[in-house]
Image: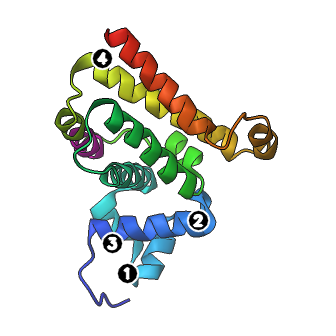
Amino acid sequence: MAQARKLTRAMIIREAITLLQEGGIEDVSLRKIAARLGVRAPSLARHVGDKAQLLALVSGTIFGEALDSIPAGLRGDDWLMAFGQALRRKQAETRDIFALLGTAPPNAATDDVTGGQLADLMRQAGLEGPRAQLEQAAIQALVTGWMTFEKSARSALFQARLPSQNAFDDSLAALIAGFGALRG
């Protein structure tokens, strides 16, 4: 297999995300990515490690894309609201997101990059320190829990019982208002 272009980590991750969206997490393999990129699987391993490491890179990339979609210039509670909405959109559009989140192991390099990006955005929004980290983590937990219901087989029943079409935004706003009350 001749390599027509320089192989990069970003190309491999993008192809892994494409496979994830097309066929689910079971379809993501170094062998399939290599075939699609016209290279051999060992070439990929030099860039992304094994499948577990690749999944960590995919997860970090997807989280980074959610962060990139938050409008610039927001501060405080407005930023927290946009953060929750961005995560929800990204989780909603990502096939097998829960398998990915549950499978991808910690990856220090990826976690440092996304953690740094998140910390920078939060600092720019005026959100710093342990309290801000707790608020951000609680929003991530709300989003992931909410998406678990929305993507489940019981989704229609769950949605039918909600008091409004804006139930997620209302819940997110209530959580953020609770943070404000605790801040004093």
Residue at coordinates 26% horizontally, 71% vertically from top-left? 8
Q: Secondary structure at mark 2?
A: helix
Residue under pointer 3: 11
Residue under pointer 4: 131
- How far separated are the C-alphas under marks 2 and 1? 17 Å
Q: Nearer the viewer, mark 3 or mark 1?
A: 3
Q: Secondary structure at mark 3?
A: helix
Residue under pointer 1: 39
Q: Between 163 and 48, which is closer to the camera in this rendering?
A: 163
Which one is earlier in the sequence, the residue at label 1 or at label 4?
A: 1
Q: Residue 19, position in %: x, y?
A: 53, 68
Magenta span includes 163: no
Which one is earlier in the sequence, the residue at label 3 or at label 4?
A: 3
Residue at coordinates 33% horizontally, 72% vertically from top-left? 11
Q: Quadrant of the C terminus?
A: top left
Is residue 94 among what the camera can see? no
Which one is earlier in the sequence, the residue at label 2 or at label 3?
A: 3
- How far separated are the C-alphas under marks 2 and 3? 17 Å
